[in-house]
Amino acid sequence: MTACPLGLASQCYCANKVNSFAETKPAKTAVLLLAHGSPENPDQTPEFLKHVTGGRPLPPTVVEEIRHRYSLIGFSPLACWTLLQADQLSQSLNMPVFVGMRNWKPFISDAVEAIASEGYERVIAICLAPQNSRTSVGLYRSAVIGDGNLPFAMDFVEEWHDQPTLAKAFAEKLRGAWQKASAENGAKLPIIFTAHSVPARTITAGDPYERQSKETAELVAKEAGLSPDDWTFAFQSQGMSGGAWIGPTVEDTIKNLKEKGHRGVFLHPVGFLCDHVEVLYDIDIFFQQFAEKEGMRLWRADSLNGSRVLTAALAELVSSRLKAMKPSAKSEERTANGE
């Protein structure tokens, strides 16, 4: 048995393809979780980036820089955590849950094929990027639809940035870690909530992503009992090529907080649901080094990863969609689940 990169022993969801769901009665509805995908090792970076850009070549310096980042973290656990989340959700709902990645294995097209081969008639699709943007959610939806001839009916969750249990999951990771870090700092640390930046032209065209990212932060702050003076918001991981990307950047925000007399900062990414390169490199390496050069210390909250509260949030999303189905469909679902 291959050793689990996450140290989960026999319950490895990536290396050993563990799936604890055992279907006892045929169901008509399945769940499909969608994510970005990431290479399994640095050598796969060039091929991975071709999927990201749709085949458009990137400058060799950009490819090498991204490969270097993956080499520094050694391994991106995005697929592992996503498969674990899917398995936990499947157990919680007693429903089949599939995983599809847009830019790496397991690909969305393969997930769609697997769902079709098993004869499911309806699919509830959830993008594991709660804030809606055509640069993420829109592309995932297009990847599922493909040529438009889906062999099942799809109920696509467009956004869930304001889902109350999601805010609880983020707040749970924030409270204790922030208090501990503030004690180490000797003074209350300012919190920087973050989400991935997107091209400015996307927002100008009417994309709701910027507004929704800040709404998520506001809900988490409220759930955690923060005052408005406790936190601010910044966008991270701006692109290395193309036009302007939205800000403020984390770097500028750290500098501004330094000017206000702070000696440290606490980062809490609320646009990501698990560890991957934007957390393990951008925050844990790059922002950490940047803060040190500014004479600042930096801490962050743990990612949600295998959070059971996150599982509950996803389960609530699915349950609400099942309840919204026609009475006949709900009756079929209860029968399929043995109710």
Image: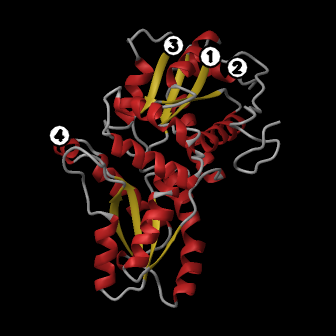
Is the residue marked by circle 4 packed among few (<14), some (14-19), or many (20+) residues within 10 Å? few
Q: Which residue is mark 1?
A: 28
In the image: residue 144, left or right of residue 258: right
Residue 83 seen in this snapshot: yes
Between discs 3 and 2, the one toward the N terminus: 3
Tell me whether circle 3 and circle 1 mark residues in contact (CB < 8 Å). Answer: no
Between tags 2 and 4, which lies in front?
4
Q: Which residue is mark 4?
A: 205
Q: Which label was assigned to residue 191?
A: none
Residue depicted at x 34% and y 45%: 61
Kind of residue indicated by mark 3: Phe
| Distance between the alpha carbons at the discs numbered 3 and 2 | 17 Å
| Distance between the alpha carbons at the discs numbered 4 and 1 | 38 Å
Quarter of the picture containing the N terminus is top right
Q: Which residue is mark 3?
A: 152
Residue depicted at x 69% and y 41%: 88
Kind of residue indicated by mark 2: Ala
Is the residue marked by circle 1 packed among few (<14), some (14-19), or many (20+) residues within 10 Å? many
At numbered mark 1, what does the secondary structure look like: helix, strand or loop?
A: loop
Which quarter of the picture shows residue 203? top left
